[in-house]
Image (cartoon, helix red, strand yellow):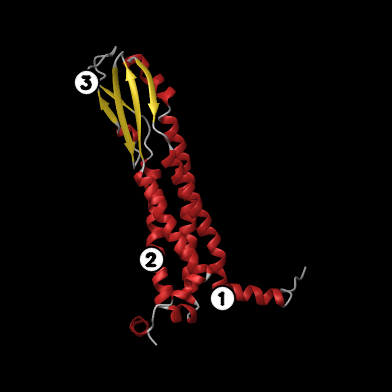
Amino acid sequence: MGILDTLTQHPLDLSVFLEPRGFMRFLQLSFSVFAYAAIRGYEGFVDINYCKDMSAHLVFDYPFALSDVKYKLEKPCVSSKDTTFIDLAGDFSLESELFVVSCWMSFLYCIIIIYIYVKLTPHYESNVKWPIYDFLASLIVSGLWIFHFVIWARAVSGIKEATDPDRVVEECKIELHCLRATTSPYFGLNLSIALGLINVILWTSNQWFLFKETPWFGQGTAVSMRGGPALHI
C-alpha cells in the first residue's frame, strides 16, 4: 500500500499518544508554545526619576534590543546641552531570536511528526529509515535547544544587569542628575528560562525512546546477548 492509499484509507491511529514517543511529542509541542508565549509576551520597564520632579518611562520587550529603547526628555535638566535622550545599553536581540527559532522548529516538527505518527503508522513501523530520520532530526532539534537555551539564559542575566536600578542611575546621574530608578519584575524572563530548560529535558530524554525505535537498538541488543565481539590484543 502506497503513502497516498494510506492517507485516504487508513484511519487516525491515536493509540500512539499512549506510547512514550507519541506522548512526548505532545509535551514538546505544548511546551514549545509555552516558551514562545513567555518570551514574546514579556514587557518590562525602567522608571527613572531625574532632576527634581521629572520622570522617564522606558519600555523594553522582544527582541530586547535595549540600545534602541530611548526616552526623549521633555524638559532637559542636564549639564550637556546635547543630551536630549535617556536610553538603555545592550542588545540581546540575536539571543532572543535564536530562542524563538527553537520554539518554532519544535512546534513545526512536532506537528509534522505527529501527523506521520497518527496517519502513516504502517509506513513508519515497516520502513526502518523513518525511525532513523525521526531520531536524527530530533537530535538536531535537541542540540539547538541546548545551545539556544544556554545563550538565552546568559542574555537574561545581561538584561537584568543592564536594567539594574543602581547601574541605570550610576550611568546617567552625572549628565541627567538621575536620582533613582525602579525596574519591573523579571518573572516573564525567568519563566522563559524555566520553560526552555523543560524543553531541553523533553527533547534530550526523548532521544532514548526514539533510539529504541531504530534498528541500531536491536543490533546493540543482539551483540550484548552474544557476549559482544572478542577483543584480540
Q: Relative to 130, does residue 29 appear above or below in the rendering? A: above
> Amino acid type of disc 1?
Pro
Distance, label 3 to label 1, CA atoms, is: 69 Å
Residue that sits furthest to the bottom in the current view: 1
- Check disc 3 and report the residue beneath it: 74
Nearest to the observer: residue 165 or residue 17: 17
- Check disc 1 and report the residue beneath it: 215
> Amino acid type of disc 2?
Ile
The residue at 47%/70% (across/down) is 17
Using the rendered view, name the quadrant where residue 80 is placed: top left
Mark 2 vs mark 1: in front = 2
> Amino acid type of disc 3?
Glu
**Numbered mark located on residue 8 in the image:** none
In the rendered image, which quarter contains the C terminus?
bottom right
Q: Check disc 1 and report its element: helix, strand or loop.
A: helix
Distance, label 2 to label 1, CA atoms, is: 24 Å
Mark 3 vs mark 1: in front = 3
Going from N to C along the chain, the mark reached first, 3 or 2, is 3
Residue that sits furthest to the right in the current view: 233
